[in-house]
C-alpha cells in the first residue's frame, strides 16, 4: 500500500500517528494511506511566504505565464497515468477522469495565454487614472500588487486535478505562493500531480506546497496578507469563516460551496428541435457525469406545465440506458460515488427530496455495480424525481443531493418561474433553453442576481454550445448566497483574490510610471 507524503518546506515528509485510508470506491480496496499529524504547519507556511513569495514576485507576468505553461506541459506528459489514478481513486469513468485532468491542463494553459496581456511587469493598473484637482497634474490611479502572504487552497473531493490547477493558476500568475490541500479521500491524483510538477522543476522553490490529509490547525496560523480559497460544503465553509485568522486578522477568504443549479426549458421549445435535444443532452450529462458529483451539476429542472409528461419520458428513457458499475469495465457509463459517506448522504438526500417530490426513475438505495465484487462499491443509480407543486422552502429548493439526482418541476409564467429558480438561495449556474427573446430577457435578467453564470442554449448556438457544468477559465466561477459568495477564474478577475488594490494619489506622470504604463 502506498504511504502518501506532504510536500512542505521544499521536501516530502510523512505524518505520524493514525493515517486516513484512500480506497477504490468501486471495489472498496484500500489504495493508500496518509497522515499530516506532527507536520510543522507554521514552518510550511513560513517557507512558502519567505522562499516562494519573493521568487514569484521577482518574476514578471510573462515569466509567470511561462511557468504555468511548463506546469501544464508537465501534467500533460503524464496524462494517462493520472487518468488511471482518477479512475481508481475517484470512481471516474475515463471520460470523467479526462474532464478533471484535461480541465487542469487546459486551465493552466489558459492562464499561461492570459499572461502576455498583462504586460511584462509586476503591477496591474486598475482602470484609468482620474483627475482629482483643478489642474491636470493631480491624479488618482488604482493598482494591484501581489499580497505578500501565502494562499492556502482547500479543495473538495470531486476535482482532485482541476481543483489544484484552477486555484494555483490564478494565484501563481498573481504572484502568490500556494499551499494546496486536497480532500483526503481522493488525494491520490493531486499527490501525483505535485510529484510530477516538483520532478519537472516547473516552479521556483516554495511556490507550490502540498498538504495531503487533514489541515489540522494550519488555517488558524494565517495572517492579514494570507488568503484562504475554499471549495466544499457550506457546513465546512461556515466553520472556516468563523476561524480566528478570518475573524481577528482579516485573512481573506473565498468560498465556493453548494449549489442547486437549474435548467429551464422555454415554452417555445418543441420536441425534436435542436434546442430540445441540447436541453435533454445537457440534463442527462450533468446528472451523470462524475456520478452527479459536480458543484455545477443540474439539480432542478423547470419545464412549462404542459410539457412535463413529455420531458419526464424523454429524460427517463435516456437515464435508463446508463450502465452503473466499475468504471474500468467495458460498457460502464457511470461509476460509483466517491466514498461510503457520500453513498449514505446521497441515499438519505433522495429520501429527503421525497417529502416534496415523487421518484419517477431510480431509488434511494444502494445498487450493485456492473463488474464490481458483489456487495462492494458505493453505487447509486440515476434518480429522477417529479415535484408537481414546487414551493420555495421545500426540500428540492433547500437540499443539495451531491449525486446523480435531479427533480423536474412545472412552471406557469415567467414571474413565478424566476421566484422558484431564485428560491435555490444563490447558485453557480443555471441554463435556459429558448429562442424566445422576450422570455429570455425576463428569465435571464430575473435570475441574474442569484447566479454567478447563466448559460443560454438557443438554436443559434446548439451545435457549438459548451456544457453548463463546465467551469471555464475565461468566465467567472462562483455564485452568491448558498454558492458561497465567491468568485474564481474569469480571466484576470480571479487574480484579484491574491492581490491588493491600492489607490495612489499624486503627480500624473509618476503614477503612470508606477502603474507600469510608461
Ligand atoms: P467538505 O467535506 O466540506 O470538504 C472540503 C474540503 O474541506 C476537504 O479538503 C476537507 O478536508 C476540508 N475540510 C473539512 N473540514 C475542515 C476544517 N475544519 N478545516 C480545514 N479544512 C477542512 O466537502 P466535500 O465533501 O469534499 O465536497 C462536496 C461539497 O463541495 C458539495 O457540497 C459541493 O457542492 C461542494 N463543491 C463546491 C464546488 C464549487 O466550486 N462551488 C466545487 C466542488 C464541490 P478532508 O477531506 O481532509 O476532510
Image (cartoon, rainbow, N blue to C red):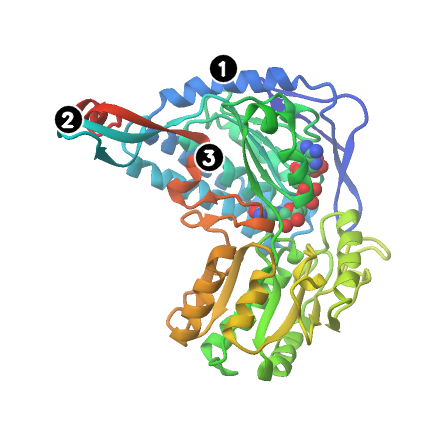
**Residue labelled 3 has its Cβ within 8 Å of some atom of ligand 1:** no
In front: mark 3 or mark 2? 2
Quarter occupied by the C terminus: top left
Q: Position of residue 445 (x, y in %)?
A: 43, 63
Q: Which residue is mark 1?
A: 50
- 24 displayed left or right of 224: right
In front: mark 3 or mark 1? 3
Q: Which residue is mark 3?
A: 497
Q: Position of residue 90 (x, y in %)?
A: 68, 47
Mark closest to the chain's N terminus, 1 or 2: 1
Q: Which residue is mark 2?
A: 137
**Residue labelled 2 has its Cβ within 8 Å of some atom of ligand 1:** no
- 142 displayed left or right of 359: left
Distance CA(mark 1)–CA(mark 2) = 39 Å
Q: Are marks 3 and 1 in contact (CB under 8 Å)?
A: no
Secondary element at image label 3: helix
> Considering only vertical position in the picture, is 127 above or below 207?
below
Distance CA(mark 3)–CA(mark 1) = 20 Å
Distance CA(mark 3)–CA(mark 2) = 32 Å
Q: Nearer the viewer, residue 285 or 71?
A: 285
Q: Residue furthest front?
A: 134
Q: Nearer the viewer, residue 165 or 83?
A: 165
Secondary element at image label 1: helix
Secondary element at image label 2: loop
| Residue under the point 49% across and 28% down | 200
| Residue under the point 41% across and 69% down | 441
Q: Can you tell me which quadrant of the image ligand 1 is in?
A: top right
Mark closest to the chain's N terminus, 3 or 2: 2
**Can residue 233 be seen by looking at this rendering?**
no
> Considering only vertical position in the picture, is 49 above or below 317?
above
Disc 2 residue crowd, few under 14, some 14–19, many 20+, Cα 10 Å: few
Mark closest to the chain's N terminus, 3 or 1: 1
Amino acid at each position: 500500500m502506498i504511504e502518501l507524503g506532504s510536500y512542505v518546506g521544499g521536501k516530502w515528509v510523512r505524518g505520524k500517528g493514525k493515517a486516513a485510508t484512500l480506497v477504490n470506491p468501486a471495489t472498496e480496496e484500500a489504495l493508500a494511506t496518509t497522515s499530516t499529524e506532527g507536520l510543522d504547519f507554521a514552518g510550511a507556511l513560513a517557507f512558502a511566504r519567505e522562499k516562494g513569495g519573493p521568487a514569484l514576485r521577482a518574476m514578471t507576468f510573462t515569466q509567470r505565464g511561462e511557468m504555468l505553461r511548463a506546469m501544464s506541459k508537465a501534467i500533460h506528459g503524464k496524462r494517462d497515468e493520472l487518468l488511471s489514478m482518477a479512475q481508481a481513486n475517484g470512481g471516474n469513468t475515463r471520460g470523467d477522469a479526462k474532464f478533471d485532468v484535461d480541465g487542469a491542463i487546459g486551465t493552466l494553459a489558459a492562464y499561461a495565454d492570459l499572461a502576455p496581456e498583462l504586460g511584462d511587469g509586476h503591477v496591474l493598473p486598475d482602470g484609468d487614472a482620474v483627475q482629482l484637482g483643478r489642474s491636470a497634474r493631480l491624479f488618482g490611479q488604482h493598482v494591484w500588487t501581489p499580497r505578500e502572504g501565502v494562499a492556502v487552497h482547500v479543495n473538495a473531493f470531486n476535482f482532485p486535478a482541476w481543483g489544484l490547477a484552477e486555484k494555483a493558476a490564478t494565484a501563481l500568475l498573481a504572484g502568490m505562493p500556494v499551499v494546496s490541500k486536497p480532500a483526503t479521500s481522493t488525494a491520490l491524483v493531486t499527490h501525483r500531480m505535485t510529484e510530477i510538477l516538483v520532478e519537472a522543476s516547473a516552479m521556483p522553490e516554495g511556490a507550490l506546497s502540498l498538504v495531503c490529509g487533514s489541515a489540522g490547525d494550519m488555517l488558524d496560523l494565517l495572517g492579514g496578507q494570507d488568503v484562504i480559497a475554499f471549495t466544499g460544503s457550506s457546513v465546512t465553509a461556515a466553520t472556516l469563516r468563523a476561524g480566528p485568522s478570518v475573524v481577528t486578522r482579516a485573512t481573506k477568504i473565498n468560498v465556493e460551496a453548494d449549489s442547486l443549479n437549474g435548467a429551464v426549458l422555454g415554452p417555445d421549445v418543441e420536441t425534436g428541435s435542436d434546442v430540445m435535444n441540447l436541453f435533454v443532452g445537457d440534463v442527462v450529462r450533468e446528472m451523470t457525469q462524475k456520478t452527479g458529483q459536480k458543484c455545477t451539476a443540474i439539480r432542478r429542472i423547470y419545464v412549462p406545465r404542459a410539457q412535463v409528461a413529455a420531458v419526464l419520458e424523454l429524460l427517463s428513457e435516456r437515464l435508463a440506458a446508463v450502465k452503473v458499475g466499475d468504471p474500468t469495465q467495458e460498457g460502464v457509463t457511470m461509476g460509483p460515488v466517491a466514498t461510503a459517506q457520500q453513498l449514505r448522504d446521497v441515499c438519505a438526500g433522495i429520501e429527503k427530496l421525497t417529502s416534496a417530490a415523487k421518484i419517477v426513475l431510480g431509488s434511494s438505495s444502494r445498487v450493485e455495480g456492473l463488474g464490481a465484487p458483489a456487495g462492494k462499491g458505493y453505487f447509486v443509480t440515476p434518480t429522477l424525481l417529479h415535484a408537481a407543486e414546487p414551493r420555495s422552502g421545500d426540500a428540492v429548493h433547500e437540499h443539495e443531493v451531491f449525486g446523480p439526482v435531479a427533480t423536474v418541476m412545472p412552471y406557469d409564467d415567467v414571474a413565478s418561474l424566476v421566484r422558484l429558480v431564485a428560491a435555490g438561495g444563490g447558485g453557480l449556474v443555471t441554463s435556459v433553453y429558448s429562442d424566445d427573446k422576450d422570455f429570455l430577457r425576463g428569465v435571464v435578467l430575473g435570475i441574474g442576481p442569484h447566479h454567478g453564470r447563466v448559460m443560454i442554449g438557443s438554436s443559434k448556438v446548439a451545435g457549438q454550445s459548451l456544457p453548463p457544468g463546465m467551469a471555464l477559465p475565461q468566465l467567472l466561477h462562483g455564485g452568491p448566497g448558498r454558492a458561497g459568495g465567491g468568485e474564481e477564474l474569469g480571466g484576470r478577475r480571479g487574480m484579484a483574490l491574491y492581490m491588493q488594490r491600492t489607490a495612489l494619489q499624486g503627480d500624473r506622470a509618476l503614477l503612470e510610471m508606477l502603474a507600469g504604463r510608461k
